[in-house]
Amino acid sequence: MSNLVVIAYDDPFKAEEVRTMLRKMQQDYLIDLEDAVVAVKDEKGKVKLHQMYRLAAAGALSGGFWGTLIGLIFMSPLLGMAVGASAGAVSGALTDVGINDDFMKNLAASFKNGSSVLFVLVRKATPDKVLAELQGTGGKVIKTSLTHDEEEKLQAVLDAAKAPAAG
């Protein structure tokens, strides 16, 4: 089962910075992210979601491939590719994976202008190593599906000053 973690930042760029750290940790096999979305509330109060996966583009690519293949069979590869890419883009755009978009927009809208919120759905992680990397990144834990003890530990790590590197 995946765990949801929502962290708010007073800075519009901090959530993206932390998501980049999490993606690097995923490449190092320290964490397995199902979804990681950054919501930014601009100075005018408009909320914009920055998804981790671009489903419409992936759908268009997949649809284009299958459309071309079917088009080759029926001797019209360009038409097949165009129809397939369009259908793939539409199906990709309509697919919602991971965290519910309305939930994220509504929660992010409740924060002050010029802030950002990081929504993370974690399949599994190596907690001690992930927490060490996140130490001192700041932010306020808003919502989680973690236990109370795990949530308190996460908030303490976010608040803690980063230990100086041994040199």
Image (tube, grey):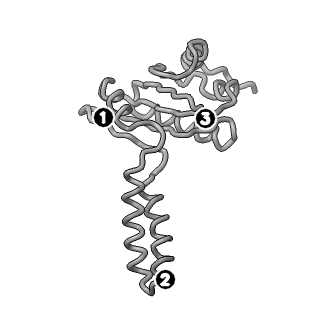
Between circles 1 and 3, the one closer to the viewer is 3
Percent coordinates x, y for residue 40 in the rendering: 36, 35
- Residue 31: x percent and y percent? 64, 35
Nearer the observer: mark 3 or 2; the answer is 2
Q: Secondary structure at mark 3?
A: strand
Mark 1 vs 3, N-terminal side: 1
Location of the C terminus (image quadrant): top right
Q: Report how many numbered discs are placed on residues in the image.
A: 3
Residue sitting at 42 percent across and 30 percent down? Answer: 117
- Whether the residues at callouts 3 and 2 have beta carbons within 8 Å, the answer is no
Q: Which mark is residue 119?
A: none
Amino acid bearing label 1: Asp
In the orientation shown, which residue stands out farthest toward the left?
A: 44
Q: Position of residue 82 (x, y in %)?
A: 38, 73
Q: Nearer the viewer, residue 144 or 69?
A: 69
What's the mark number on residue 72? 2
Q: Residues within 10 Å of mark 2 (few under 14, many from 20)?
A: some
Residue 84: % across, % down: 42, 69
State the CA–CA distance, disc 1 to disc 3.
30 Å
Above-or-below relation of 127 to 57: above
Q: Secondary structure at mark 2?
A: helix
Quick one: label 3 or label 2, which is nearer the N terminus?
Answer: 2
**Nearest to N terminus: mark 1 or mark 2:** 1
Q: CA distance from mark 3 to mark 2?
A: 40 Å
Looking at the image, which is closer to me, 29 or 3? Answer: 3
**Disc 3 residue type?**
Arg
Extreme-bottom residue of the structure:
75
Q: Which mark is residue 42?
A: 1
**60 left or right of 41 in image:** right
The kind of residue on which mark 2 rests is: Leu
What residue does disc 3 label? 123
The CA distance from mark 1 to mark 2 is 47 Å
